[in-house]
Image (spheres, helix red, strand yellow):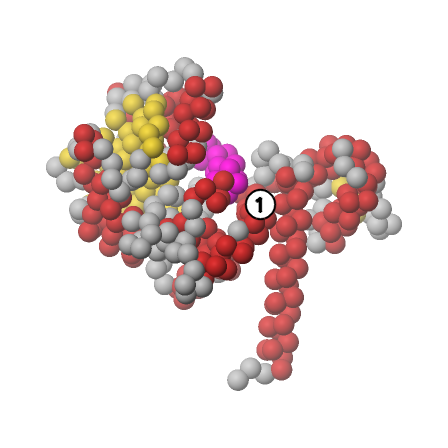
Amino acid sequence: METTKELDAFRKQIETIATHGVLSMSIALGLKLKLFDALAKVASEEEPKSARDVADAAGMKERYIQEWLNTMACASIIEMTKSGDKYWIPKERINDLSSSNSHAMVAHQLFLPIFGRVFDQICQVFEKNGPLGMEYESYTDFYRVMDEVSHAKHKANLISHFLPLTGLTDKLKSGAAVLDVGCGSGFHIFHLAEHFPNSNFTGVDVSLDAVISATQALSVEGKDLHNAAFIHSDAGRMSEEWTEKFDWVTIFDACHDQQRPDLALKEVHRVLKPGGVFTMLEINGTSNPYTDRQEIGLLSAYLYGLSMFHCLPVGSNSKDALCLGTMWGTKRATEMLKVAGFTDIQVVPTPFFAVNVLYLCKKAM
């Protein structure tokens, strides 16, 4: 039985959570409206500025800007003068709060308003007689934000840190056939195709919108790339003509939210050449929430919550879905890879992708 002191501490915890929820929404507002950018442009510690100055720079209403500035300053996200009417961002934080280059966990605040838009639908999904799950198309903004969050991080590390772990750099230079399963907007394909013109890259995704977007980007942004293509396909039922076609198959954070990831992994094994390499970047977890809480701390609650509002609903939207969720973890993932046919499986830490882990698998000759 909890003591009065422990109950008071719990109530304080709930109060803090509510406060952080409001702050998360407020940070998301600042990112979307580029309010941090406007404040950084006009103000500094040596020359703090008023709400009117920031409103003029942002092209917004002064009174609303004042309330937002007060929210951020009271949370010590930004600073204010003792008179309480002028503000600035500490210079060390400006890059993290920039709308175009925000730190990953700062940018993650943008997920909260997105989840707010599907809140009532998620309530229905919870009901015993409610829908099985959610459609990918319900989360258009989620994928846009996810792209924004991951692009800068992956662009900085994909070639320099991630690729050396695979042992494929020389093969890609000489020429390889590569498949990206769950390619989304095609960012990884574009980045790799630019660096390795002798290799051919194919991206597949179950979302038609994602494939259309990637194909359009290929014709506009990647017009000099003749070694990339995008195909609308269910990863669990890929082309029969692809048997033993690819030297490297990869999945970036896109296995856990598939409805039948077991079938997708079996298909990956089928389309790999003997001796080919499969890499799967996934959220790091232990397959045990108690151990997750011990090893990952409060971030584990964030990851389970992210799963509850997105990954689990889209991965549960069929009667035969496995309903994995974000935190399926290394134990279950390794078991599923073995069932798919892989015997050479390594679980490799990726400190440059802090919340992830890499499954490095080779198909037997």
**Residue 36, image x, y percentages:** 69, 39
User: What amino acid does circle 1 point to?
Assistant: Leu
Q: Is residue 3 left or right of residue 205?
A: right
To which quarter of the image does residue 271 belong?
top left
Q: Which residue is mark 1?
A: 110
On whether residue 232 falls in the magenta region, the answer is: no
**Residue 356, image x, y percentages:** 40, 47
Could you tell me which residue is drawn at 49 percent across and 44 percent down? 139
Is the magenta region chiefly helix, strand or loop? helix
**Residue 74, image x, y percentages:** 74, 54
To which quarter of the image does residue 240 belong?
top left
**Residue 245, image x, y percentages:** 20, 29
User: Number of labelled discs?
Assistant: 1
Could you tell me which residue is drawn at 54 percent across and 55 percent down? 119
On whether residue 145 falls in the magenta region, the answer is: yes
Q: Residues within 10 Å of mark 1 (few under 14, many from 20)?
A: many
Q: Which residues are magenta?
A: 141-156
Residue 350 appears in the picture as rendered: no
Q: Is residue 203 left or right of residue 294?
A: left
